[in-house]
Image: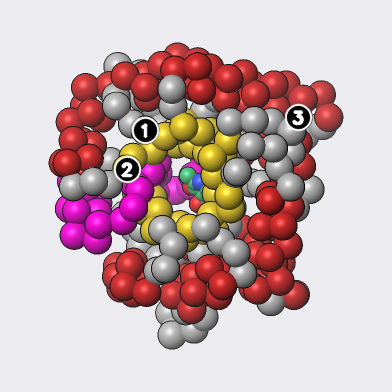
Amino acid sequence: MPVLCVNVDHVATLRQARMGIEPEPVTAAYMAELAGAAGIIMHLREDRRHVQDRDIELVRKTCNTRLHFEMAATPEMQSIAMDTDPETVCLVPEKREELTTEGGLNCIDREEELAEFLAPLHEKGIRSSLFIDADTAQIDAAHASGAEFIEIHTGHYADAKDIRERHVELEKILEGIRHARALGLKVNLGHGLNYRNVMAFKNVPGISEYSIGHSIIARSIYVGIDRAVRDMAEIIRTFKD
Ligand code: PXP
């Protein structure tokens, strides 16, 4: 059954707006788990714009489900991942000037480099995922790099300007899922998914996890994090295996 993993980065975004002590991502993570999250996702960016090192340490110590650590493929992040020992790492591209992760990681012609980067993490028992666009060549390269999962970037679908564009982007994702599954990759989806646009995947088989942050944290301002996570977890619980 597909599950919901909740990204709590934007709890930290709110705290960092005042460089203060609240709200605490670790508390949000705990509440998200109580409300049905199957995992907690945090992205420690090189510029530390939202999540801080201590947040990762605290969630690692208190997480009762699984910690998914999103990170750039840098030596610094590799070393933090080795120390933190999350259940999964997800490699993402990072640009300092971007508002959020803008596109998938380029894996083409980097298969060996990525495999080398992931090797010590795999040796430690940490599972790996690569955040990539729904492109068959990228999926082939991700597969060749030895990652167990890919996370297909759903941002282009979520940001589509009209129905036609949305349909085109959705088709790319569906084809990407089929292609990845045929290669034996496990498939997660994430970026820009909300309570409405996620419905397009209701009858799509072969998706392991949905990685959702912004829409849940935004809704939690109105209804509380418990309700916001529960609503999304209930939607995903009805989805096809
Ligand atoms: N997956 C990845 C790899 C991401 O970088 C992000 C955003 O941090 C998400 C999923 C969650 O996206 P959103 O916050 O738009 O739900």
x, y percent for residue 139: 45, 21
| Residue 241 is inside the magenta segment | no
- Residue under pointer 1: 148
- Whether residue 137 is visible, yes or no, is yes
Mark found first going from the N terminus, 2 or 1 = 2
> Under tag 3, what secondary structure?
helix
Q: Name the mark nearer the viewer: 1 or 3.
A: 1
Task: Give the percent coordinates (x, y) of residue 51.
Answer: 40, 65
Is residue 223 left or right of 121 when viewed as pictured?
Answer: right
Q: Is residue 93 magenta?
A: yes
Question: Which residue is pictured at 35% across the width and 48% down the height?
Answer: 88
Q: Quadrant of residue 114?
A: top left
Residue at mark 3:
166
Residue at which label 2 appears: 127
Q: Residues within 10 Å of mark 3 (few under 14, many from 20)?
A: some
Gap in Å between the C-alphas at discs 1 and 3? 28 Å
Q: Which residues are magenta?
A: 75-103
- Inspect the image, locate mark 3, and give the three-letter code of the amino acid beneath it: Arg
